Image (cartoon, helix red, strand yellow):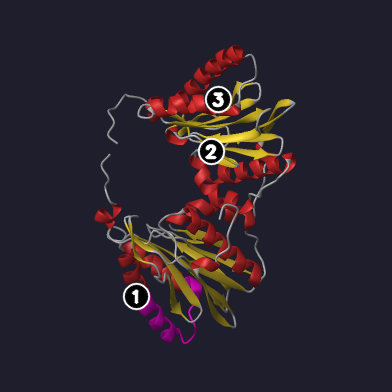
Amino acid sequence: MEKVCDAQIKGVSTGTTILAATFDGGVVIGSDSRASIGGEYVSSKTINKVIQVHDRVFCCMSGSLADAQAVTKAAKFHLALHSVQMETPPLVIAAATILKDLCYRNKEELQAGFITAGWDQKRGAQVYVVSLGGMLVSQPVTIGGSGSTYIYGYVDAKYKPDMSREECLQFAINALALAMGRDNVSGGVANLAVITESGVEHVVVPGNKLPTFHDD
Amino acid sequence: GSNMEGTGPEWLSAEVKTGTTIIAIEFDGGVVLGSDSRVSAGDAVVNRVMNKLSPLHDRIFCALSGSAADAQTIAEMVNYQLDVHSVEIDADPKVRSAATLVRNISYRYKEELSAHLIVAGWDRHEGGQVYATLNGLLTRQPFAIGGSGSFYVYGFVDAEYRKGMNKEESQKFVLNTLSLAMSRDGSSGGVAYMVTIDEQGAEEKVILGNDLMTFFDQ
């Protein structure tokens, strides 16, 4: 059968697994670190898909890597200007809305989706999803990327609102490890950020330190 | 796609698929099989209570997925072949024999057929066994999942499966997995059918929607 490479149509894509989840007092956002060309060649083993767009606001990209990078760069700029004008740290929903506007107005040219997570004074910890066409939705927990299909069941079963920080971090690492174990275009290390009122902590879990399961 | 006026609704001509979730797991002394009950033709649900767990012999069942017609036909053919075989050997057939018969049909006609059957049962030689026959291979596994809904629960079964579960734990594992897949896969839904097979025989059960697991957002 003839094989048509996705990459020939879309370019380098972050076949990926991304997620974000709120816990009592903060939010965890994380991703894998693999970039691949058409599912046949790993073009980067250690790409960072968790981008800091402001002090307490992060976003994760999925879809076309080039599109996602361009959009986050533009969003970072707008958010910085907005924050200076308002003389206050930006709301998480402001960051998500900026991404959404960019995705919606340019929906014909772009192929990028985002998860935005962060903490602000007004509403505390929040997670927003901007989908491919530019829909904006708020959820307590969300997953995205090609690897996410394999962990819908796990996330539905295991996520509880108001977990502790340690429980939520372990939940996120487990979910990423499970997805990376089944999706051939997700892999590498798990990059996570834990965002709370007091600050941001980066957590990196290398492949050999990820949790293992029954057949590993 | 393009459509001439007057050809009727799309589902009348769409292929009938058991886009589905099926699972089978071995425990010490037997097996548990489970399935959803939705049969779809395009966007329409044409049967919401179909039992996709089909008997091949007294203590051997199979779980159907993929094209409804193909899967049912394979199951019926193997049912007949097993009847003949068990008369010839004057004994109950092995689960491996049933799985081999399914695999032979799936492999020989792999270009024409698009169905995947999981075969599971109990025999006195090897006890409880689960066999996957996807694309014409034959492999014995501690548990197997299949159908369109199975993709959503790979992570869950990877995390939750433990060796040495007993009958009740295996039944719970099957029901929880089905609930999760049915709530996410548009082609899976309805009720859950479950069959538990051990030395005593095969016990069939139906579990209705409101008795299934619920999650944090429900």
Given the image, on which type of amino acid does mark 3 rest? Ala
Q: CA distance from mark 3 to mark 2?
A: 26 Å
Q: Is residue A88 magenta?
A: yes
Q: How many discs mark residues in the rendered view? A: 3
- The circle drawn on residue B188 is 2
- Please, what is the dominant secondary structure of the magenta stretch? helix
Determine if marks 3 and 2 fall on one subunit: yes
Disc ID at residue B98 = 3
Q: Which subunit holds the residue at mark 2?
A: B
Q: Amino acid at mark 2?
A: Ser
Q: Quadrant of the N terminus of chain B?
A: top left
* Front label number (3 vs 2): 3
Chain containing mark 3: B
Residue A73's label in the rendered image is: 1
Q: Classify mark 2: helix, strand or loop.
A: loop
Q: CA distance from mark 1 to mark 2?
A: 41 Å
Number of other residues with Cα within 10 Å of mark 2, as a class: few under 14, some 14 to 19, many 20 or more: many
Q: What's the residue at 51%, 79% (across, down)?
A: A56
Horizontal arrangement in the rendering, residue A108 relative to residue A147 (left or right): left
Asked if residue B107 lies in the magenta stretch, the reply is: no
Q: Determine the residue positioned at 46% across, 59% down.
A: A144
Counting from the top left corner in percent of width and height, residue B31 is at 66, 35
User: Could you tell me if residue A168 is visible in this image?
Assistant: yes
In space, the residues marked 1 and 3 are separated at their CA atoms by 59 Å
- Along the line of sight, the residue nearer the viewer: B83 or B88: B88
Q: Could you tell me residue A148's position as x and y percent?
A: 48, 55
Q: Which amino acid type is shown beneath numbered disc 1?
A: Lys
